[in-house]
Image (tube, coloured by chain):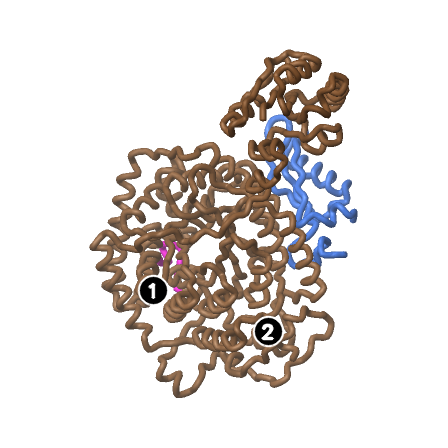
């Protein structure tokens, strides 16, 4: 098919030149007319060249409708329109305008060659992969050999991990017991949300819970900031999600490089608001999402149930809430459920596993010295949590946000590497999650006074030198470099993303532009804005690397030395738990201290067998809990009302 | 509340530049602006006063997490 390309501008014809090059590459012979011609000359050229289709382009936007009206009249008078197919294009043209004016189609500045090809061939399928892209869920984490490369590091890690395995071998906790009960129940109901949530609570479970959880089930008392979601709300929400899915055309953030994958963390407090935010970020190109729960959820023995919304940060983990999130996700979206720092770590992983979450998050060190949980308790629960994650085929990431409290990177990284090696020993796929931040230690030491690039490079290079594990900086990247001003915030996130691409990491967790704004909830628009920035930055750099300064080498070597020195000290401690209590992975001077949540709740397995269960708080259990009065909770929230 | 407002997922931001002689005056003008538009539940996200006035972003929340969302009404 021969095609005529005709610019209707006095000088601008770059768009048509571009189209010519691409159409010729597709095998279409093209004739490009010079600029500054009349409409009559276009018609005459089309007849003379015996073309089958004409593309008329007009760059300047004003008066475009009247101009193309005249094009139509002239080409009709010449006998061209009707005999030869005509499409129009330009800055102010779209397909709708073109068709309203009686042309075959229209193209604008964002029209891709595939769409023009589809227009020429009258076959929308030729452009479907760009107009209606379908993302496939990547196999994540990407392949790594999970090998510790430096012998000295490996020696210390193996000593520490041996010690953890021995120390935990005969110990258990209420958190482990609840996870066992929940896993057993979920297995019995084959993971069905409806059936599980309708099950009556067992006395055994409630005796492992705090009073607030017992009150929830027995007296319908929610935490102060939480409320139940009604049946009508859930039904309306699911209709909204169906609409969002109907018009869902995911964007791709990456340009030439296929990595890093981009994750966002959600946890607005409400699973329905989370779901809407997830639909926004999926549409704007995010590859994955992470569930964040409220702080009180981590410090309470036991999980509540049903559809719960929270007016503060963090969305309560319940099987129903997670199932609602799961139903909201696109099939390509990677889903992580945070479990790492609290008293419900093993049970959360059970729930996530039965719902098919792709990954979870476990870090004994962080949760113990920064998350408020007793080191002994979290060591027992953390090992069990990894075992559960392995059973459900879930890799887990290991965040190091203790840097935000002031812990130096080498101590945080030592703790992370211990978790990684522990994970490998238990058959898991651990993911290193260094925090790229302008944290307190870095500020005090002036390590980022010159730029935000060099020290972050050193941190990642140190990890890459020590071991071949997946690396997924977070959480989010650029922590404490953000500003309340939206453009600055988007820029710092985007530039950190570009830096991570240069470093060859597997994935990143990114902030919204509201990261530094603390006087209200994060907004969906702020999430979209940050993703816009990342996409543009990936486009800008393509495969070009950011080059750090020579000081990175010295910092990298120093970090490796400091990590090994820390691991050596931990290996020499009576136990890993003792090392945590002693502050070897972060102490009060650094700004952290051992948590007290769940203190003295670890028991030996032999003691547990004698008693049958572990009493945390003495609570009276009613066989028939009271029925909800004022609210009409959603059907799945009615477990305690049976 | 109009139907359009009901479709806003969470919040509406207004960004502009207001001529003023101090940060305090900027805040007063922004509050006046938001009240005049019936957007009482608002918060200043960012404000940068310099020279002729202030570059600001102010946010009016339509739906906060935990609310009964307007976009779930029939």
Q: Is residue A118 above or below residue A280?
A: above
Magenta segment main secondary structure: loop
**Image position of A466 (left or right of A262):** left
Chain of the residue where label 2 is placed in the rendered structure: A
Of the 4 image quadrants, the one containing the N terminus of chain A is top right
**Image position of A547 (left or right of A156):** right
Q: Residue at x 40, y 83 (%)?
A: A608
Residue at the disc numbered 1: A427
Q: Is residue A402 above or below residue A124?
A: below
**Image position of A381 (left or right of A638):** left
Q: Chain B is shown in which shade?
A: blue
Q: Chain A is shown in which shade?
A: brown
Q: Which residues are magenta?
A: A586-594
**Can residue A527 be seen here?**
no
Q: Residue A614 at what x, y percent from top left?
A: 44, 81
Of the 4 image quadrants, the one containing the C terminus of chain A is bottom right
Q: CA distance from mark 1 to mark 2?
A: 31 Å
Q: Residue A533 at what x, y percent from top left?
A: 53, 38
Chain of the residue where label 1 is placed in the rendered structure: A
């Amino acid at each position: 098919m021969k095609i005529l390309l005709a610019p209707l501008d006095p000088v601008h014809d770059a768009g048509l030149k571009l189209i010519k090059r691409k159409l010729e590459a597709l095998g279409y012979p093209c004739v490009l007319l010079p600029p500054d011609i009349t409409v009559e000359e276009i018609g005459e050229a089309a007849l003379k060249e015996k073309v089958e289709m004409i593309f008329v382009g007009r760059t300047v936007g004003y008066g475009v409708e009247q101009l193309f009206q005249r094009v139509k009249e002239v080409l009709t008078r010449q006998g061209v329109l009707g005999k030869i197919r005509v499409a129009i294009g330009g800055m102010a043209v779209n397909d709708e305008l073109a068709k309203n004016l009686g042309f075959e189609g229209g193209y604008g500045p964002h029209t891709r060659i595939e769409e023009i090809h589809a227009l020429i061939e009258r076959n929308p399928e030729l452009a479907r992969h760009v107009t209606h892209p379908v993302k496939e869920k990547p196999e994540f984490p990407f392949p790594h050999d999970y090998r510790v490369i430096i012998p000295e590091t490996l020696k210390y890690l193996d000593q520490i991990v041996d010690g953890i395995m021995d120390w935990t071998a005969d110990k258990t906790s209420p958190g482990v017991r609840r996870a066992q009960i929940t896993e057993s129940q979920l297995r019995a109901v084959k993971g069905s949300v409806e059936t599980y949530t309708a099950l009556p609570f067992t006395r055994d479970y409630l005796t492992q819970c705090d009073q607030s959880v017992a009150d929830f089930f027995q007296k319908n008392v929610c935490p102060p900031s939480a409320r139940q979601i009604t049946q009508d709300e859930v039904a309306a929400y699911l209709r909204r999600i169906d609409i969002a899915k109907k018009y869902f055309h995911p964007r791709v953030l990456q340009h030439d490089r296929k990595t890093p994958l981009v994750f966002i963390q959600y946890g607005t407090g409400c699973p329905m608001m989370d779901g809407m935010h997830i639909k926004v970020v999926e549409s704007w190109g995010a590859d994955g999402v992470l569930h964040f729960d409220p702080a009180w959820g981590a410090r309470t023995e036991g999980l509540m149930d049903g559809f719960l919304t929270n007016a503060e940060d963090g969305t309560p983990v319940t099987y129903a809430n997670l199932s609602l999130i799961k139903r909201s996700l696109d099939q390509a979206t990677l889903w992580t459920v945070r479990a790492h720092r609290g008293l419900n770590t093993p049970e959360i992983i059970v729930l996530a596993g039965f719902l098919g979450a792709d990954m979870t998050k476990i870090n004994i060190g962080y949760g113990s010295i920064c998350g408020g949980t007793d080191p002994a308790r979290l060591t027992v629960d953390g090992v069990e949590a990894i075992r559960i994650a392995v059973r459900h085929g879930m890799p887990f990431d290991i965040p190091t946000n203790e840097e935000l409290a002031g812990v130096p990177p080498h101590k945080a990284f030592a703790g992370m590497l211990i978790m990684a090696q522990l994970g490998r020993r238990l058959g898991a796929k651990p993911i290193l999650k260094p925090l790229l931040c302008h944290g307190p230690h870095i500020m005090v030491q002036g390590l980022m006074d010159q730029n935000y690039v060099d020290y972050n490079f050193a941190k990642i290079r140190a990890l890459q030198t020590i071991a071949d594990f997946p690396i997924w900086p977070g959480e989010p990247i650029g922590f404490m470099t953000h500003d309340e001003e939206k453009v600055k915030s988007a820029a710092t996130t985007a530039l950190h993303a570009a830096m991570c691409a240069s470093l060859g990491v597997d994935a990143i967790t990114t902030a919204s532009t509201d990261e530094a704004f603390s006087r209200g909830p994060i907004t969906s628009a702020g999430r979209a804005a940050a993703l816009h920035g990342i996409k543009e930055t990936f486009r800008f750099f393509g495969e070009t690397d950011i080059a750090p300064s020579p000081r990175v080498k010295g910092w990298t070597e120093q970090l490796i030395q400091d990590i090994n020195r820390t691991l050596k000290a931990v290996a020499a401690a009576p136990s890993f738990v003792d090392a945590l209590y002693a502050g070897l992975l972060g102490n009060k001077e650094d700004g952290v201290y051992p948590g007290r949540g769940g203190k003295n709740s670890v028991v030996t397995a032999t003691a547990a067998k004698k008693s049958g269960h572990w009493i945390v708080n003495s609570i009276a259990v009613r066989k028939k809990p009271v029925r909800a009065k004022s609210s009409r909770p959603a059907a799945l929230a009615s477990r305690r009302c049976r | 509340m109009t139907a359009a407002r009901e479709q806003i997922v969470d919040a509406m931001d207004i960004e502009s530049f207001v001529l003023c002689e101090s940060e305090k005056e900027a805040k007063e003008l922004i509050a006046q602006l938001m009240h005049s538009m019936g957007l009482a539940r608002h918060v200043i996200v960012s404000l940068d006063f310099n020279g002729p006035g202030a570059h600001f972003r102010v946010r009016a929340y339509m739906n906060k997490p935990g609310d009964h969302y307007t976009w779930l009404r029939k």
